[in-house]
Image (spheres, rainbow, N blue to C red):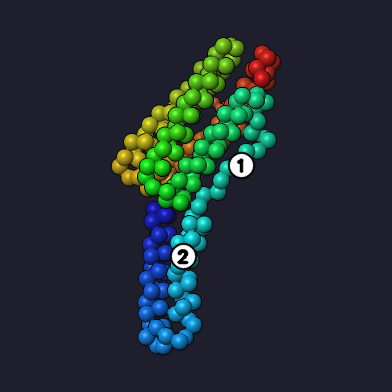
Amino acid sequence: MKRNLGMFGVALLILSLIVAVILGFMAGPTSPLPWLLVAILVAIPFIYRKLAAKPYIEWKDEYSVGIDSIDQQHRKLINLINQLSTAVDYSTGEEFEREALAELVEYTKTHFVYEEGLMEDNGYPDFEAHRAQHRAMIAEVGIVLTEYEKDHDKAMSHAVDYLKEWLINHINGTDKQYSSFLIGKGVH
Ligand SMILES: [Fe+2]
Ligand SMILES: [Fe+2]
């Protein structure tokens, strides 16, 4: 909705500028004003994309769970989220968007399997609750993917926001809770 309103505003601005350019040229083609307005018109898509772009996530040391293999996977997840954000923000096309989304979902599942294996093999007491969180997330992603087939733009924006928030909160919260237990078991 917010995005639609924003796009409506931009469309209105572009229309007003076009009218102003036509009026400017009718008043006299030697005036620099219409040319300036043409330059603004050309720049609008670039400015709009920059403003609408979602901020990239950067890896922070505080995200570390103290286990190298998992930190590397979490870093890769963050890269894949950023790749998806780029695909969406810069309208790189549906195929590229689909690929970025599918790659993120697939790698998330691979990562969950790896993490669950470590927890289960080492007898982590909160294993079941942690796995339940992973499963709830995968179920939610399934809903988002179904939405995507109905309304690409809306679902994609929702997917990026949801995945970003969920993964960062999970990495920085639930995942950290197993750190000392697994490290104590010799996992590194
Ligand atoms: Fe994780
Ligand atoms: Fe996890």
Quadrant assignment for ligand 2:
top right
Residue drawn at 41 percent across, 74 percent down: 17
Q: Secondary structure at mark 1?
A: loop
Where residue 3 sits: x, y (%)? 42, 54
The answer to whether 95 appears left or right of 87 in the picture is left
SS at badge 2: helix
Q: Which residue is mark 1?
A: 58
Give the left or right position of residue 62, taking residue 162 as reference: right
Q: Is residue 161 visible?
A: no
How many labels were placed on the picture?
A: 2
- Cβ–Cβ below 8 Å for labels 2 and 1? no
> Residue 85 vs residue 180: left or right?
left
Within 10 Å of the Cα at label 1, are there few (<14), some (14-19), or many (20+) other Cα atoms? Answer: few
| Distance in Å between CA atoms under marks 2 and 1 | 28 Å
Disc 2 marks which residue?
A: 44
**Residue type (three-letter) at the residue carrying disc 2:** Ile
